[in-house]
Amino acid sequence: MERINVQPQNQAVPENWQPVYAKFTAIWIADGSTLEALRRKLKVLQEQEKTLAGKMMMVVEAFSHRPVTTWYTQNSKANDKTWCEQLLERLPIGGLLIFDLGFFKFPWFDAFTEADKFFLTRLREKTSYKVIRCLTNTPFYRDEIISMGEYRSNPCQHQVRLVSVLWGSTWNYYLTNVLDPQMLSAQQVCELYRRRWRVEDAFLLTKRLLGLAYIWVGDNNGVQIQIFATWIFYAVLNQLCIDIAIALNQPLDRISTEMVFRALYHFSQAVLRGDASDAVPYLVERQKRFGLVKARRKRHRDIDAYTQQIWALSS
């Protein structure tokens, strides 16, 4: 963990995102996830009704996927807004937090602006708003400064920015309080929000690959121990993926965390034989055999091509 903490924060940031990364003190992604039902192996649990193990809130760095912090509650039905105050307090001044519609509420948006912090989310359907100024208007995207809650008794007190992008036949709407397009362009707003799915990947890895989907204890303290132990291991595994990506000169997104995890068995056997002592050189040398680098699939190429088409035709 000490090695992880001393790593440069921009170590895994792609070159084309470095200018954006330098403008914010942090770029984080937050999301909540409900834990699976408690395993009923213990006699005390077998005598109880089947219950979920609770809910956790996770924050990861947008580019490196490193865990930043996590919170836990026994209430599996807890709303994501439960952690609004903690999230805002933890985010440094000048930082940017990306989150989904589960956090959508006007007072929280105002709190970001008043604290000199930034957010990026989506616009909830049927939200009333008034266009204050149009920054850009093309057939494929619009960039506007708006005021929200025009017909509400408690409207949003501060203006926000609405970026609308036509994807296929569907308009997607992104909301941020970064009002200056020079600080965050419309294209960067769209592509940065797409990175919100990285936290979903982290949940998938910790639950299905690292076993957090199976809660083996029945008390609150035991559940938290399993959660934090799993995230610590994930942090170490993620740093190993970063080191491999740097050694192979590949973007971190191209490194398969699952295959790196499975390759650790072969590394451990090599250590026992005395054939290896450092995981990174061992795995890098055998990266093709272990399939550590993801193949570029057709759907990824199609998405990239369509994205370039949207912004090229709009420029």
Image: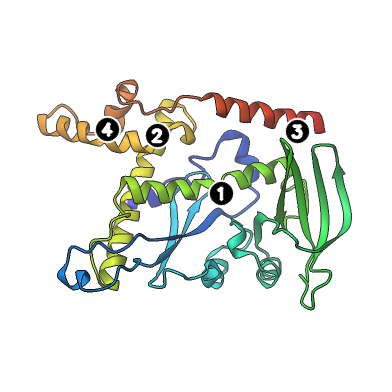
Q: What residue does disc 1 label?
A: 196
- Identity, as a three-letter code, of the amino acid under mark 3: Trp
Q: Real-space Cα distance between discs 1 and 2?
A: 18 Å
**Lower sequence index among marks 2 and 4:** 2
Residue 21, visible in the rendered structure: no
Who's the residue at 71% across and 55% down the image?
A: 175
Q: Real-space Cα distance between discs 4 and 3?
A: 40 Å
**Lower sequence index among marks 4 and 3:** 4
**Lower sequence index among marks 4 and 1:** 1
- Identity, as a three-letter code, of the amino acid under mark 2: Ser
**Lower sequence index among marks 1 and 2:** 1
Q: Circles 3 and 2: CB distance less than 8 Å?
A: no
- Identity, as a three-letter code, of the amino acid under mark 1: Arg
Q: Real-space Cα distance between discs 2 and 4?
A: 11 Å
x and y percentages locating residue 269 in the rendered image: 15, 32
Q: What residue does disc 2 label?
A: 256
Who's the residue at 58% across and 34% down the image?
A: 15
As drawn, the label of residue 311 is 3
**Lower sequence index among marks 3 and 1:** 1
- Identity, as a three-letter code, of the amino acid under mark 4: Ala
As drawn, the label of residue 263 is 4
x and y percentages locating residue 107 in the rendered image: 68, 73
Is disc 3 surrounded by few (<14), some (14 to 19) or many (20+) residues within 10 Å?
some
Pick the residue in front: 21 or 97.
97
Q: Real-space Cα distance between discs 3 and 1?
A: 20 Å
Q: Real-space Cα distance between discs 3 and 2?
A: 29 Å
Pick the residue in front: 125 or 296.
125
